[in-house]
Amino acid sequence: MSTDDVQRIVDREGGLRAVGGTSDMVTLLERAKTDPRARLAVAMFGYSVRKAIGALAAALGGIDLLVFTGGIGEHAAVVRAEACRGLDAFGIALDPEKNERGEELLGAPGSRCVVRVIATDEDVVIARHAHRLCR
């Protein structure tokens, strides 16, 4: 294999697609109800997010606020739960009911870290940046 072939496989055929058959999180979340491979892909994604949160919290000496945003962060309670699972040492604790309802504030009582969902409109942000660059 050429290095380009290897790069293409790693970039486009690995990760969620290799495990769950697609890289589309909406599809994976729907299929996870009955498909163990999709369930594993969602869990692996959550684990990757959890590792990043933990690494940043450690590097920063703690974390006061954790924000979920964008399509997955705003709409995928399962992913938010997976991302926060086991982060109690950093003061991150989700309230499962608030998380399922998709409330703006998701922290459990006594959580030292504020956990929230903030809606975004990524298309508007991109359009604003493009408009500024074109002026």
Image: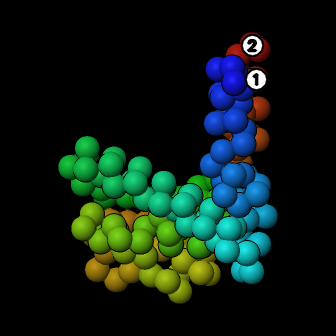
- Pointer 2 and pointer 1: residues touching (CB < 8 Å)? yes
The image quarter containing residue 89 is bottom left
Q: Is residue 117 visible?
A: no
Question: Above or below — where is 72 with respect to 32?
Answer: above
Marker disc for residue 2: none
Question: Above or below — where is 52 with respect to 72?
Answer: above
Q: Residue at x 29, y 71 (%)?
A: 88
Q: Residues within 10 Å of mark 1 (few under 14, many from 20)?
A: few
Secondary-structure class at tag 2: loop
In this view of the protein, which residue sits in the foreground, 135 or 27? 27
What is the three-letter code of the residue carrying label 2?
A: Arg
Location of residue 82 in the rendering, given as x and y in whole percent from the top left corner:
50, 69
Of the 4 image quadrants, the one containing the N terminus is top right
Quick check: 8 left or right of 118?
Answer: right
Count up the numbered dots.
2
Of the 4 image quadrants, the one containing the C terminus is top right
Q: Residue at x 66, y 29 (%)?
A: 6
In this view of the protein, which residue sits in the foreground, 63 or 40? 40
In this view of the protein, which residue sits in the foreground, 115 or 30? 30
Location of residue 21 in the rendering, given as x and y in whole percent from the top left corner:
76, 57
Q: Which residue is mark 1?
A: 131
Q: Is residue 38 visible?
A: yes
Question: Above or below — where is 106 with respect to 1?
Answer: below
Q: Which residue is mark 2?
A: 135
Q: Residues within 10 Å of mark 2 (few under 14, many from 20)?
A: few
Q: Residue at x 65, y 28 (%)?
A: 7
What is the three-letter code of the residue carrying label 1?
A: His
Secondary-structure class at tag 1: helix
Location of residue 80 in the rendering, given as x and y in whole percent from the top left corner:
53, 67
